[in-house]
Amino acid sequence: MNQQTTQVTAEQASAETQRFMTKVYGWMSFALVVTGFVAMYTASSPALLNMIFGSTYTLIGVILLEFIMVGALAGWVSRMSASTATLIFILYSALNGLTLSGIFIVYTTESIASTFFISAGTFAAMTIYGYTTKSDLSGWGNLLFMGLIGLIISSVVNIFLNSSMLSWITSCFGVVIFVGLTAYDTQKIKNMNIIGNEGTDEDKKEAIMGALTLYLDFINLFLYLLRLFGKRK
């Protein structure tokens, strides 16, 4: 009798985790749609492009606001309501669309589209691996974090060096880092789901934070692949 009860509980936990991950992917996909729509709309409007990229102060202001929003979600999400966290996440994805509209100035629409599908396929493969693997990927965390720090430092250094070779190496390194992070973060998000709190405010905020993490993984993977394979105008 106890064995049967344990089996039912395990099945219920698995089903709840699947529903949680469905919410995570749903919010992530919605944010990507918002970002894509805002980016394409902005790219088609000379006035908006000039407003964002015509002034260095405006562009820096938008980027700083994005960092503040991500920082607010990461640091204070426990103090927010689920609706506030959701609103910040959606606003962040819209602001990110404003800054990402610049890729339409630099790269051809065809190469952006093809790179997006390559990114989607790569992301899907790695997130499926992270979700289904029985291996513990927690050991990847420190290695990937150190790699991410190195990636940031090399990117900052290359702002001053403007080396095409360093840019290519950094892009390759970035792809590897975010491919690994996609699998690692997927497993981490899956494991952080608290069984039994489905439908609560905490459950909704966990789904938003998971969606934000995977959204950032996808966007960065896409941008690094675009730097490697994108065809410039």
Image (cartoon, rainbow, N blue to C red):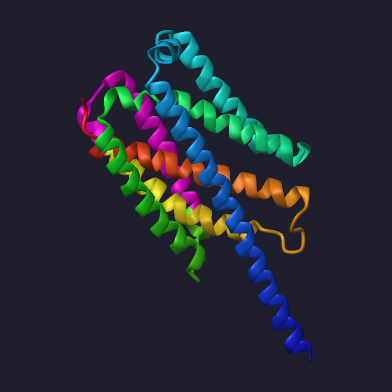
The magenta stretch spans residue 150: yes
- The quadrant where residue 73 appears: top right
Give the residue drawn at x 53%, y 29%: 94
Can see residue 100?
A: no
152 left or right, relative to 190: left
Towards the viewer: 194 or 25: 25
| Quarter occupied by the C terminus | top left
13 left or right, relative to 40: right
Q: Is residue 183 above or below residue 40?
A: below
Give the residue drawn at x 74%, y 58%: 198
Return the x and y of residue 174 as percentages of the image width and height.
35, 41
Towards the viewer: 38 or 200: 38
| Quarter occupied by the N terminus | bottom right
Q: How many marks?
A: 0
Q: Is residue 131 above or below residue 69?
A: below
Magenta span covers which residues? 141-168
Give the residue drawn at x 38%, y 22%: 43
Return the x and y of residue 104 as percentages of the image width and height.
32, 26
Can see residue 198?
A: yes
Towards the viewer: 147 or 54: 54
- The quadrant where residue 89 appears: top right
Return the x and y of residue 42 as percentages of the image width and height.
43, 22
- The quadrant where residue 55 appears: top left
Of all residues, the one furthest to the bottom in this rendering is: 1
The magenta stretch spans residue 120: no
177 left or right, relative to 85: left
Q: Is residue 177 above or below residue 21?
A: above
110 left or right, relative to 57: left
Return the x and y of residue 12 as percentages of the image width and height.
70, 73
Q: Main secondary structure of the magenta part?
A: helix
